[in-house]
Image (cartoon, grey):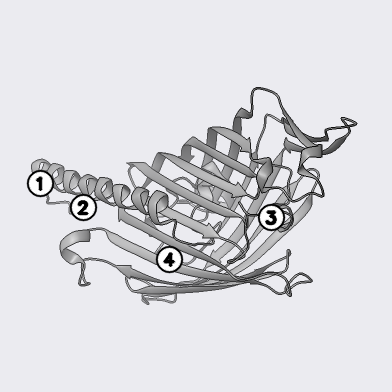
Amino acid sequence: MEINRKKYAITSGSGSNPEMTGSSKGIQYSNRLMILLFFGCIVWTAGNGQQLPAWSSYYETGFVWNPALTARWNSIETSITHRQDWIGFDGAPQYTNISFQMPFVSGYHTKSAMGFFVERDAVGPQEKIGGAITYNYRFRPQFFGKKDDVLGIGFLANISRYQFNLQNTVVYDKSQLTIDFSQGNSVINPNLGIGAFYISISDFYAYQKSHYYAGLSVNQLIPGQIAQFRGRSDNVSLAAIQAGLHATMHVGYRYIPFRKKYFYEPNLMVMYGLSKGIHAMAHLRFEMMQSFWLAGGVTTTGEGFAQAGVILDKYSFMKSIVREGSLRIGLKASWNVGSVRRITNAGLEFYGAYVFEVE
């Protein structure tokens, strides 16, 4: 969408074990799927019932922007993120995403992967509810003389429903404002996206060897106008909301000291919109594997953020529930350090995921 979400909100009103037998593998796989389905039911209830405040990030749900990141580390994952910006502001941006990702492994790297997600994005008078399916095909390009690097090519197909409530729009006289849709009082918008993601080692070694990675994607390949705000008396167009091309690029490096169980990972994400310029985010993450992570960063929109999370696996008190997988739970806070810091409040994110590696 060609719209500044936070600027718009300011004007809104109230409103495997190799020796394991085939039978044993089947039982273990069934148990894992049951855990995934159970966790999925929990997060769906949380997302629709409690509406936990949150601030989502590219790191956790990157395949929403770049489909080549679907199941990027050969793991099955079901997750929820819920973001609440500017706590205390009526009509402030909110975003909820519930997703599932599954890889298909061949040899020592992931051959392909599929995923889907549903999302709700609300900004003042605007609400978007939609869903998408992603597919990611991977192969070994052997760039730069490497033998086990992996390149993924991803595709995304989504459909969204946009609707607007003029009662949540602050204007001098609401009776003088109208809105035009291409169909009815809302609009259905299908769209497409493509992406690529390169990692310098096999994804099986992502938590064992230091490596670098890079990704590139283009979203909203079907541009078009969603709606127009007009003055009721003179029918003059006041603002237009459009679906326009967006591109994202990200690069990063994961440094894992020799024989250590932790890593440092700096990365940079840049987003480009045809009519809104460039937005960038610098991010640094420290993770103690099977234990916890800490992360933080800054963006060119004047925001800073910090996140802390725990990893509960078979060695934790949750071992009877998570079994061979892990439960990842994180909380992130964001705040504005730019020119609008005096009139904005902090934002929060809740992130939860159940993850297990495919052997």
Q: Earlier in the sequence, mark 4 or mark 3?
A: 3
Q: Disc 3 to disc 2, how far (Cα)? A: 49 Å
Which mark lies nearer to you, 1 or 4? 1
Which mark lies nearer to you, 4 or 3? 3
212, 307: nearer the viewer: 307
Q: Are marks 2 and 1 in contact (CB under 8 Å)?
A: no
- Residue beneath disc 2: 16
Q: Disc 4 to disc 3, how far (Cα)? A: 43 Å
State the residue at coordinates (17%, 43%): 30
Specify the amino acid type for callout 3.
Ala
Q: Earlier in the sequence, mark 3 or mark 2?
A: 3
Q: Residues within 10 Å of mark 1 (few under 14, many from 20)?
A: few
Q: Earlier in the sequence, mark 2 or mark 1?
A: 2
For the residue labelled by badge 1, is the local secondary structure a helix, a strand or a loop?
A: helix
- Residue beneath disc 4: 209
6, 124: nearer the viewer: 124
- Residue beneath disc 3: 9
268, 81: nearer the viewer: 81
Count of numbered circles in the view: 4
- Residue beneath disc 1: 24
Q: Are marks 3 and 1 in contact (CB under 8 Å)?
A: no
Q: Earlier in the sequence, mark 1 or mark 4?
A: 1
Q: Earlier in the sequence, mark 3 or mark 1?
A: 3
In which quadrant of the rendered image does the N terminus lie?
top right
For the residue labelled by badge 2, is the local secondary structure a helix, a strand or a loop?
A: loop
For the residue labelled by badge 4, is the local secondary structure a helix, a strand or a loop?
A: loop
Q: Disc 3 to disc 1, how far (Cα)? A: 53 Å
Image coordinates of residue 347 in percent, x first then y, are 58, 67
Specify the amino acid type for callout 4.
Lys
* Above/below status of 90 relative to 130: below
Residue 16 located left or right of residue 277: left
Q: Disc 1 to disc 4, how far (Cα)? A: 30 Å
